[in-house]
Amino acid sequence: MDESATSINFTADETRDNLIFVLSVYIPLDLVIIAGNALVLFLIRQTRSYDKPQFVLLGSLAFVDLLTGIIAVPMFMWGCILRRSFYLQEFDKCELQFLPAKICVSVSWFHLILITVDRYVSIMKPLHYHKHISLHRIYFSIILSWIIAFLFGIMQLFWEMEHIDEGIFFCYKMNESAIEVQRYISLVMVPTGTILVSIMYFKMFIVVKKLEKNIVIIPIRTRNIVRNRYKAAKTSALIVGAFGIAYLPHALRPVVYSFGYQRSEVYWYDLIAEVLFIMSSAVNPFIYVCRLKQFSSALRHLLQINSHKQQQRLVDKDVHPTAQLQITYSSPRKKCDFSSSEMI
């Protein structure tokens, strides 16, 4: 490993390359996150689906992703810029700027579990769905997920921090004990949640496959309900899968470094892991629009309205502002001849 990486003496080229990468990658990604999730929240409002548990959860997840774009990603960019080099070995100890991203990702993970449970109950116990799933329980679960994720994210602040003065502004070295505690909690929560989610989806798809074999003898109305719920389950599975793919490289970092690699040797892997870490927040809106009929229909309706308004403006511009309106009345009762000019 070179001396500049260990002594934290950065060259101008390292600082420039790091700044160019952060600005060229994270700014467009952040704009997609903000615009996409703001659109999803607007479509949920337009379709008036905010009184259904499924869409309440999706809207809440979109709100988390929106906060990720507004708060977490800019703070994440700030932390990446402060390290000033791709090869800085100890940048993980400067984690204060990464706390919002950690909290938002944790909240997203809890939301995915809640969405999976909602789909599981709708398919496995359809007759008792409204008995087990209510808006009050959904709101309570969402608030609880925020509380747990927030406590998990700020856990490192419970121990004393050490300010790093070696040319890095507002950088604090976290206590090793705090990092270890947070790491052990992650090692318990993430695999446990992953196993539970996998089991639930496995059972759901088995039940749906059995129903599809007997689809002919099922009444048409029930058949449509089964298909819609199966499609909703596949949509939530895609959302969970996208999150898992995005989080996996970051989760495997300890495994990579266990082989004795230094950051200067596998810095490219860290860069990919960091970008994918927040990529799911940008992918989710596309999954919603492509998979959910309510969202795609609302989006097409919105685009048609905007296109009609734009065409109407063009027509209005082509009409002369003092156009003469010829109105002819041919009889004393209904018609007479006169001309008038009106402003349009």
Image (cartoon, grey):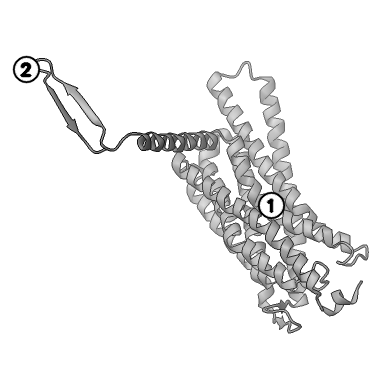
Q: Quadrant of the C terminus?
A: top left
Residue 250 point in image, percent of width and height = 78, 58
Q: Please, what is the three-letter code of the amino acid marked with disc 2?
A: Pro
Residue 182 left/right relative to 306: right
Residue 102 left/right relative to 176: left
For residue 338, above or below residue 254: above
Residue displayed at 66% across by 77% down: 158
Residue 113 can be seen, yes or no = no
Query: Dividing the picture into quarters, in which one does residue 271 lie?
Result: bottom right
Residue 341 point in image, percent of width and height = 20, 34
Q: Which residue is mark 1?
A: 279
**Earlier along the polypeptide chain: callout 1 or callout 2?**
1
Q: Which mark is residue 154?
A: none
Which of the pair 193/51 is nearer the observer? Answer: 51
Residue displayed at 86% across by 76% down: 4
Residue 251 point in image, percent of width and height = 79, 57
Which of the pair 216/233 is nearer the observer? Answer: 233
Q: Quadrant of the N terminus?
A: bottom right
Which of the pair 61/130 is nearer the observer? Answer: 61
Query: Dividing the picture into quarters, in which one does residue 152 lie?
Result: bottom right
Residue 215 can be seen, yes or no = yes
Q: Which residue is mark 2?
A: 332
- CA distance separating discs 1 and 2: 74 Å
Q: Secondary structure at mark 2?
A: loop
Query: Dividing the picture into quarters, in which one does residue 325 lie?
Result: top left
Residue displayed at 70% across by 56% down: 25
Q: Which residue, as the protein is rendered here, is positioned at the far left?
A: 332
